[in-house]
Image (cartoon, rainbow, N blue to C red):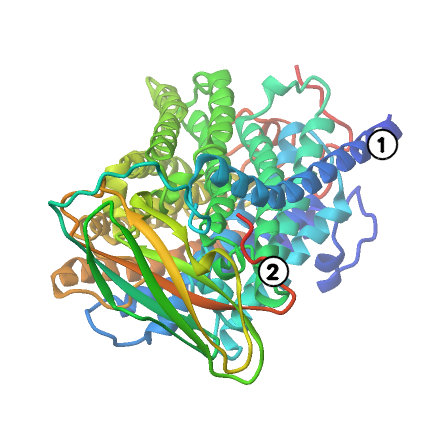
Amino acid sequence: MVENKSFANVVMLRKLLFFTLVMFVFGYALVPFYEKFCEVTGINNLLQPDVQAKEIRVDESRWITVEFDANTRGLPWQFKPLQTSARIHPGEPVNVMYEITNNSDREINGQAIPSYSPRFLDKHLKKFECFCFTKQVLKPNETRQMPVQFVIEPGLPQDIQTVTISYTFFELPDGTAAAVKR
Amino acid sequence: MAAVHGDAHGHEHDDHHPSGIMRWITTTNHKDIGTMYLWFSFAMFLVGGTLAMGIRAELYQPGIQILEPELFNQFTTLHGLIMVFGAIMPAFVGFANWQVPMMIGAPDMAFARMNNWSFWLLPVAATLLVGSFFVPGGAAAGGWTFYPPLSTQGGLGVDLMIFSVHILGASSIMGSINIITTILNMRAPGMTMMKMPLFVWTWLITAYLLVLVMPVLAGVVTMLLTDRHFGTSFFNAAGGGDPVMFQHIFWFFGHPEVYIMILPSFGIVSEVIPTFSRKPLFGYSSMVYATASIAILSCVVWAHHMFTAGMPTVGQLFFMYATMLIAVPTGVKVFNWTATMWRGSMSFETPMLFSIGFIFLFVIGGFSGVICAIVPIDIQVQDTYYVIAHFHYVLVSGSLFALFAGAYYWIPKWTGRMYNETLGKWHFWLSMFFFNMTFFVQHFLGLAGMPRRIPDYNLQFADFNMISSLGAFGFGLTQLLFLYIMINCIRSGDKAPQKPWDGATTLEWTHLPTPAPYHSFEKPPIVK
């Protein structure tokens, strides 16, 4: 009887330890699941080119000021837009140039991450070309000019007159392949 | 408590266990380990409480007086971590260790050696956590939820916290595996599942929740660690990660965690109220089903903690309705407790007072929880003192009050001595008064917009903060009275009668002498 009982306990212990292990793996499995979920539902889709819609109506009755902002974090680059703002109509394609300079004497990989204000701007912003879609590799003291092409859709709420598009460059450790897969 | 067991063992069950400090280090006895859990958690409660006193002292007046903002943030962070992982959770495990074997008629826990291990991991983890105050850069300061990017940027203190959480998680998992196996495999003959005392049922469900979500917490802190030191980018946007994903994984653990901290207290209250109403628990089976459905629902509501983090409206609606649904089984429980008291032959000893106080205040916390579940309101009160008030109503007047009720209820069984009833009642009424003084006004502060985790505030909040701080100091001092009552009871309390509570019906009261012998139920009782 006692033998049976302690054997049953050990069987139970094994099952529960296995379950614990499964849940630990499940924690990690949430990472690809989260990415897949965002991809399928189109949430958080900041770093992929949008498809150019056949026809976007340009709303000429309305002006929007787009401000451009550029930052670097933890890498010796100089990063700035060539124009600080633009006055545009919703629906009108916009082309802006940014310039980065590597001030150090080593080759550095960088990745730009966008940030928008107001936060829901990403729903109304269609980006066709951006230096943030890939990593940027700059040789020592190299300077590069890069375009961003986008449209702000006329669906942007009427009370918004100014929007800000901001990029921050982060350094990628060596060997990090295509930084952003999503 | 060593002296207490001294007269219990040595009679018929002397198996030459070591004495002095080695007894406690090497013990595999569930009662010894339960005792150590309870003392440990009370010590951590005092440490966490001291931090709370520091926080309230700083908030006594507007402006920075006592704690620099950086240290204030460390205080709020460690207060939360220590109270959740160091005080409340181990205290419930302590109760489980003492009570589960006695209530189901088992001689000990299933894995006695592992039980010893799961306790002795705790002091190690606590040392890491408290010691992190003294490393360069100080303790973790990004809040008890340690969201990145703050937690990926902090110093050595964050690493110590991560290791500490790993160890605490391992301890909890071992403890809950032990509890599940004990409950499922070691019940006395005749003790069917649906005859188990409700405290045992709630712990069984809690233990399952623990093995479900603790490994996920271990996973997420491991990701944090590799992000900090090994070049991964789980939460680092620059490397393709996402800090919001941390919040999702953390709260996948974190929301069941809050039910891990409240379900055992439902169990304690469900033992105390029938005893002092001298009636069986109303709706026993509905209580079991309500507990199970709370546990299941708790796994699908996590994102209500992050309504403002950015989420589609559909998601917000789903998590809002799922959250509000939890009010249904919880309402079943409150109804059953009330119905148990209805026309009962009630008496109001300290455990009963704490249980009634629990119902009263936990319902307030539950209601403010339903209010927070409503998305448009939550967007307003997110990260304000309203949320602080809400979760202190469920964690302090919920979990902690139930722990007090359980301690007063079972201390005669554990020590063979009675506590001082007059002082116990003082403890309850002072706690009740000061608790509400501290936290009720925080609802107003939150609704007026005072943000949490900030050491300074606008002058308009000054009066309520002063009231809250004074209440907190009173509440803190009152808990020293609890320490005095317990020590006084253990050392020089009156001898407890065999069954001090005439309404008690569970095995530890009906089948075991008082105090409970060192080895109990070596021959299992027959339950009819």
Q: Amino acid at mark 2?
A: Thr
Is circle 1 on the same chain as circle 2? no
Q: Chain of mark 2?
A: B
Residue B40 in view: yes
Closest to the camera, between mark 1 and mark 2, is 2
Quadrant assignment, res A25:
top right
Question: Could you tell me which secondary element the residue under label 1 belongs to?
Answer: helix
Question: Could you tell me which secondary element the residue under label 2 belongs to?
Answer: loop
Q: Which residue is mark 1?
A: A7
* Residue A58: % across, % down: 21, 43
Q: Which residue is mark 2?
A: B232
Q: Amino acid at mark 1?
A: Phe
Q: Callout 2: few (<14), some (14-19), or many (20+) C-alpha neighbours within 10 Å?
A: some
For residue B523, side relative to residue B413 (left or right)? right
The quadrant of the image that shows the N terminus of chain B is bottom right
The quadrant of the image that shows the C terminus of chain B is top right
Q: Is residue B20 above or below residue A12?
A: below
* Residue B231: % across, % down: 61, 65
Quadrant assignment, res B452:
bottom left
